[in-house]
Image: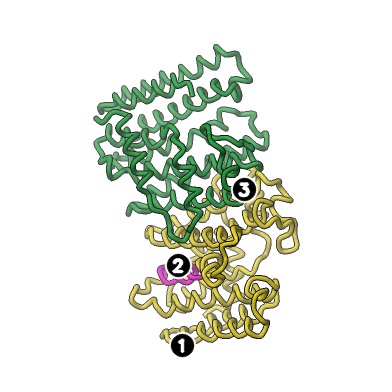
Chain colours: A yellow, B green
Amino acid sequence: MRPAEELRDAVEAYLRSLTFAPELGHLEDALRYSLESQGKRIRPVLCLAVVEAAGGDMEQALPAAAALELVHTFSLVHDDLPALDDDSERRGRPSSHVAFGEGVALLAGDALFAEAIRLALTYDDPQIARELVDATLGMIGGQHRDITGDDDDLAELHRLKTGKLFSASVGLGLRLSHVQDADQAAWRVFGDEIGLLFQVVDDILDGDGLASRLPADEVRRIAEGAAERAREQLDAVSADTSVLRELVDAVAFRTA
Amino acid sequence: MRPAEELRDAVEAYLRSLTFAPELGHLEDALRYSLESQGKRIRPVLCLAVVEAAGGDMEQALPAAAALELVHTFSLVHDDLPALDDDSERRGRPSSHVAFGEGVALLAGDALFAEAIRLALTYDDPQIARELVDATLGMIGGQHRDITGDDDDLAELHRLKTGKLFSASVGLGLRLSHVQDADQAAWRVFGDEIGLLFQVVDDILDGDGLASRLPADEVRRIAEGAAERAREQLDAVSADTSVLRELVDAVAFRTA
């Protein structure tokens, strides 16, 4: 079992080595700028950790893991635009539209999404790309609920905006490890729970979402419940899930 | 051979019947608004006409044809945004961001692209989605050249921004009709030439691009050259290409 840090290094190296469609020309600079911003890479690391636990081939899973990070990065580049969240900083650096202009950032987001699909389509099994696209549609629907104030049901908003891509991170890992559909249930619930955990901790750190509506100890209890259920699901699969347990702790106790 | 008008009606009916990912919620209204704007549907009709000429099954090609129109519509919705061309009208109606707001239009464009890929992935052959994504990347690269003033080579800009999706319209038609790679050359050059023709006539109608740089009769000669070469390629394939010839004329002599 490779530790999480080693998986993260593999993701970083793979992202740096990516070649993009030559037709993008100088737009490639904007794609690399946003991809090089040293995020946590939690989605691709989660995917690779599932592959390792489920007995798959980590190297062979790197394109799919990278595709998850590209979809996530595409969503950040578009969300940061003035038309949506209007954030001028991302991970301590100017956001894409501040660095390159709004038009270029818009196109860079589009291109990141297209490159993500291209990576997912390097596999012969179209189910990889299908699961990624379905998750992306859920994410977009969640973002739409968020900006239009259709957020009465915060749990549903979270399930879509954040949860879908976490679930797909686990789902792609299972597909790449050829885990049969009938054996995927506990794994997939684990994916839903760690996604919920991630978002609730996000709300706590940012003081918004659930944290702005419920007392702090209640929000903390929701996070602990999600972490607990995630661990229980890992108990239910017959595999060495030690690295996945570390990831649950890392998400639960993160401070940024 | 179904006439072009019948193919167009089939595309319209199929687009109206499309169901989108339920997670999109009310964002679906913005997707339908842009798709219902009664464009010429030239890309899907071209795809279906190739399928008919090459002996494929028109009904079975409708998802791919619709995917081409969704990619085109996604590009229009994003291009119309203030960050890019800032057009407040599209086909005589308020553009998406005027009707729904910039944030929703941005997400609607993203969702149209994702739904296009989903349609392309309804086929077992991943080559369909691959060709569509590659064309989209070329289109995005062309749009980037356009907005950054990197347009010294207008022919290359046109080849990317408009030509790629025209070529893919022919290419998808060939794949869906199981035309062997070795027999695709003339068809594909035809796709390139009708794409060039479309863009040059666009420039003439809008008074920009080539039409703003060259004398009118020279631009007209370039268009006639593309139309002539498109017809020559059709002479080179052993198929009933009468409907495709009509499309060349319709593109060459269009007035809007």
Q: Position of residue B25 (x, y in %)?
A: 48, 58
- Please state the chain letter of the residue tagged with numbered disc 1 in the rendered image: A
Quadrant of image for the N terminus of chain B: top left
Residue matched to label 2: A172
The type of residue carrying mark 1 is Asp
Q: Is mark 3 on a helix, strand or loop?
A: helix
Q: Which of marks 2 and 1 is nearer the N terminus?
A: 2
Report if residue A184 is visible in the image. yes
Q: Where is residue B222 in the image (x, y as percent from the top left)?
A: 51, 18
Distance between the Cα atoms at labels 3 and 1?
A: 46 Å
Residue at x 57%, y 35% (from the top left corner): B89
Residue matched to label 1: A235
Q: Report if residue A97 lies within the magenta region.
A: no
Instruction: Please provide the residue range marked out in magenta.
Output: A166-176
Q: Position of residue A157 (x, y in %)?
A: 54, 67
The type of residue carrying mark 3 is Glu
Question: Is A171 rendered above or below residue B110?
Answer: below
Q: Position of residue A15 (x, y in %)?
A: 59, 60
* Residue closer to the observer: A146 or A80: A146
Q: Is mark 1 on a helix, strand or loop?
A: helix
Q: Is residue B116 left or right of residue B244?
A: right
Residue at x 65%, y 45% (from the top left corner): A104
- Check whether the beta carbons of the residues at disc 2 and disc 1 lie within 8 A of each other: no
* CA neighbours of label 3 inside 10 A, class few (<14), some (14 to 19), many (20+): many
Question: Is B211 rendered above or below residue B163?
Answer: above
Q: Is residue A106 left or right of residue B256?
A: right
* CA neighbours of label 2 inside 10 A, class few (<14), some (14 to 19), many (20+): many
- Please state the chain letter of the residue tagged with numbered disc 3 in the rendered image: B
**Residue B102: mark in rendering:** 3
Specify whether disc 3 shares its chain with disc 2.
Answer: no
